[in-house]
Structures are given as structure tokens and as C-alpha cells.
Image (tube, helix red, strand yellow):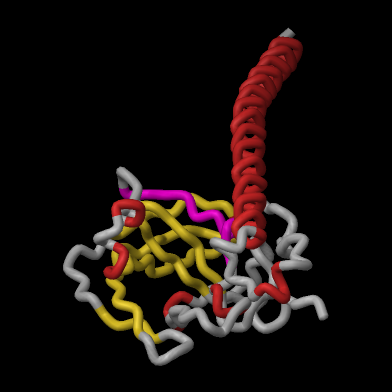
């Protein structure tokens, strides 16, 4: 009798545990599906807009000889593992500094915040900058600039690194989506002056997301 009761109790515990696990898994799965669905839509819109800007002679960095045959940039396949929540540590006391570019010009920047996040289970941090020359432009008053280097540079992506555009969030966190990383315009046209990525913003892993290196069609 006693062994029968123990067996029944054991089955009940296992059953209840399984139900709780199933419910928790079900909730997480729905969240993940929504996150993935929204993210993929957002990435698709980013890619379409970037390609449209490159086709438009008013906004394209491409010289006419490349733009007339332009069919689209080459992107990595969208990967939501490269879309991360980052905790921001604001740096209100940071002083402006002159960031070198690929030309003689320098870009006046301020370290607006440091972003802390995890990728592939490893912790990372990147400096996020605010470009001082844009503060007087209403369209860019909340603009933030995130340049970075990674292990794909010089092979699958541009050797000088890539950029991500961000906006000042209301709180102390934001989404960094590496699927929205793009090349500096000087990759396409040497007449552009592009800030050089600071070494401190180096990620020691391959970021296979966003725009790939540009190969002009001959």
C-alpha cells in the first residue's frame, strides 16, 4: 500500500513538473517567435531602404559608373542571434575628442555611453559616440554612432570595420542589431571622409550579420 502511494505521488510530481515546464516553454516560444518575426521584418525594411538609397542619385555614395548597374548590396543572411539588448552606462563627463578619418579631416565626437551586452555567451562592451557636428540638425539631435571591428574584417567584410546607427533611448538600455551594420561610404567612393573605428571597439569574434564587403562589378 505504502509503495503504491509513493508511486502515485511520484507520478503526480512528474506530471505537475512537466506541465509547468511545458507552460514555461510555450510562453518562451511565443516570445521568441514574436521577437524573431518583428526582427526579421525590421531587418528586411533596413535592407530595402539601404538599397533604395544606393539606387537614388541624390543619396547614393556610388559613382555613376557603378550606380547605373547597381542591383543591390550583398548582405549576410539575417540572424537574430546578432540582435542583442545592451545595458548603457552613460558618460556625461566625457570630453569631446577628434576622431581620425581616412582623410585629413577629423570628426569631433563624444563618448555618449558604453554599451554592455553578450554575444555567443561572451560579455562585450563598445563605446557609443555622439557626433558634435550634427547636434544643430533637428533630424540628428538624438543620433548616436556605433563603429566596430570584428574578425570578419578584411575577408568577408570591409577591412576598416562597419557602422551602426542608433538613437538615444529613453532608459538605460537599447537594442543593438548587427544585422543593420553597414559600410563607411568611403568604401564605395574615395571622395567621402569616414571616421576610423577606434581599436577599443574591437569584437574578437566574427559578426556575420549586416552588409558584406563591396565588390564593384567590372
In the rendered image, the quadrant that contains the C terminus is bottom right
Does the rendering let one see residue 179? no
Q: What residue lies at 60% left-to-right and 43% top-to-bottom?
A: 42
**Magenta residues, as a range?**
172-182
Q: What residue lies at 47% left-to-right and 66% top-to-bottom?
A: 124
Q: What residue lies at 67% left-to-right and 75% top-to-bottom?
A: 157
Between 128 and 125, which is closer to the camera in this rendering? 128
| Residue 97: quarter of image | bottom left
In the rendered image, the quadrant that contains the N terminus is top right
Residue 56, above or below 15: below
Q: Residue furthest left?
A: 93
Residue 151, position in %: x, y? 63, 77
Count of numbered labels shown in the rendering:
0
| Residue 7: quarter of image | top right
Q: Is residue 11 left or right of residue 124?
A: right
Between 134 and 128, which is closer to the camera in this rendering? 134
Between 186 and 66, which is closer to the camera in this rendering? 66
Residue 134, position in %: x, y? 31, 64
Please check the rendered image and state whether residue 80 is part of the magenta-colored stretch, yes or no: no
Q: What residue lies at 44% left-to-right and 79% top-to-bottom?
A: 195
| Residue 119: quarter of image | bottom right
Residue 9, position in %: x, y? 67, 15
Residue 29, above or below 141: above
Q: Residue furthest bottom?
A: 104
Q: Is residue 170 left or right of residue 147?
A: left
Residue 3, position in %: x, y? 74, 15
Does the rendering let one see residue 122? yes
Residue 178, above or below 37: below
Q: Is residue 69 left or right of residue 139?
A: right
Amino acid at each position: 500500500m505504502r509503495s503504491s502511494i509513493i508511486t502515485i505521488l511520484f507520478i503526480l510530481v512528474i506530471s505537475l513538473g512537466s506541465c509547468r515546464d511545458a507552460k514555461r516553454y510555450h510562453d518562451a516560444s511565443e516570445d521568441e517567435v514574436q521577437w524573431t518575426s518583428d526582427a526579421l521584418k525590421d531587418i528586411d525594411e533596413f535592407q530595402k531602404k539601404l538599397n533604395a538609397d544606393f539606387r537614388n542619385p541624390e543619396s547614393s555614395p556610388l559613382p555613376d559608373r557603378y550606380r547605373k548597374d547597381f542591383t543591390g548590396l550583398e548582405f549576410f543572411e539575417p540572424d537574430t542571434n546578432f540582435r542583442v539588448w545592451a545595458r548603457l552606462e552613460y558618460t556625461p563627463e566625457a570630453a569631446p575628442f577628434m576622431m581620425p578619418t581616412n582623410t585629413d579631416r577629423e570628426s569631433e565626437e563624444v563618448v555618449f555611453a558604453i554599451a554592455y551586452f553578450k554575444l555567443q555567451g561572451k560579455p562585450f562592451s563598445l563605446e557609443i559616440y555622439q557626433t558634435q557636428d550634427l547636434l544643430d540638425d533637428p533630424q540628428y539631435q538624438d543620433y548616436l554612432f556605433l563603429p566596430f571591428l570584428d574578425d570578419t574584417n578584411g575577408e568577408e567584410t570591409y577591412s576598416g570595420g562597419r557602422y551602426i546607427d542608433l538613437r538615444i533611448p529613453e532608459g538605460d538600455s537599447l537594442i543593438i542589431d548587427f544585422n543593420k551594420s553597414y559600410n563607411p561610404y568611403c568604401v564605395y567612393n574615395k571622395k567621402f571622409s569616414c571616421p576610423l573605428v577606434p581599436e577599443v571597439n574591437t569584437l574578437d569574434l566574427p559578426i556575420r550579420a549586416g552588409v558584406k564587403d563591396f565588390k564593384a562589378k567590372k
